[in-house]
Image (tube, rainbow, N blue to C red):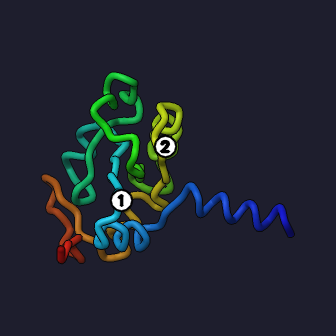
Amino acid sequence: MEDQIKHYENKLAYEMDPSDLFEALSNGENIVVLDARKDFGYEAEHIPTAINIPHREMTVESTQHLDKNVLYVTYCDGIGCNASTKGALNMTRLGFKVKELIGGIEWWKQDGYATEGKNDPKPGLKIECAC
């Protein structure tokens, strides 16, 4: 049972679902959403406030402007894509605190959250700060 408890604790330490991310962003937590897909995927549609650094382009040089004191949440298309996993691994190797978004942008939209981009952004709940 101890191994199983450790397994679930580790999952929660390194993964986040869309509702947890939405709540954290709405509460103004120190999080940066990072789209790990290629530029054209980000430009077509992305999570509001997200930045784009394709996992293949994550280097010391391409990330030197980023704050290592915040949590980065990587995402990609969804369960059929592993760009978020590759991005999370790359960012961790570069010394950043990282979690991976379970289900990617597809589960984000499925849960009713808004997106932005060129391809008919999806209306939905928007991240708002009341401060």
**Residue type highlighted by circle 2:** Ala
Residue 119 sits in quarter: bottom left
Residue at 50% in and 56% down: 79
Say which of marks 1 and 2 sits in front: 2
In the picture, which quadrant includes the C terminus?
Answer: bottom left
15 and 114: which one is in front?
15
Residue at 49% in and 53% down: 99
Reply above or below: 118 against 67: below
What label sits on residue 88 in the rendered view?
2
Residue 7, percent from left and from top: 73, 60
In the picture, measured across the screen, residue 10 lies left or right of residue 32, that is right
Residue at 45% in and 58% down: 101
Q: Secondary structure at mark 2?
A: helix
Q: CA distance from mark 1 to mark 2?
A: 15 Å
In the picture, measured across the screen, residue 104 lies left or right of residue 51, that is right
In the picture, which quadrant includes the N terminus?
Answer: bottom right
How many dots with numbers? 2
Q: Secondary structure at mark 1?
A: helix
Residue under label 1, please give it: 105
**Residue type highlighted by circle 1:** Ile
Residue at 20% in and 68% down: 122
Residue 23, percent from left and from top: 36, 73
Reply above or below: 15 against 34: below
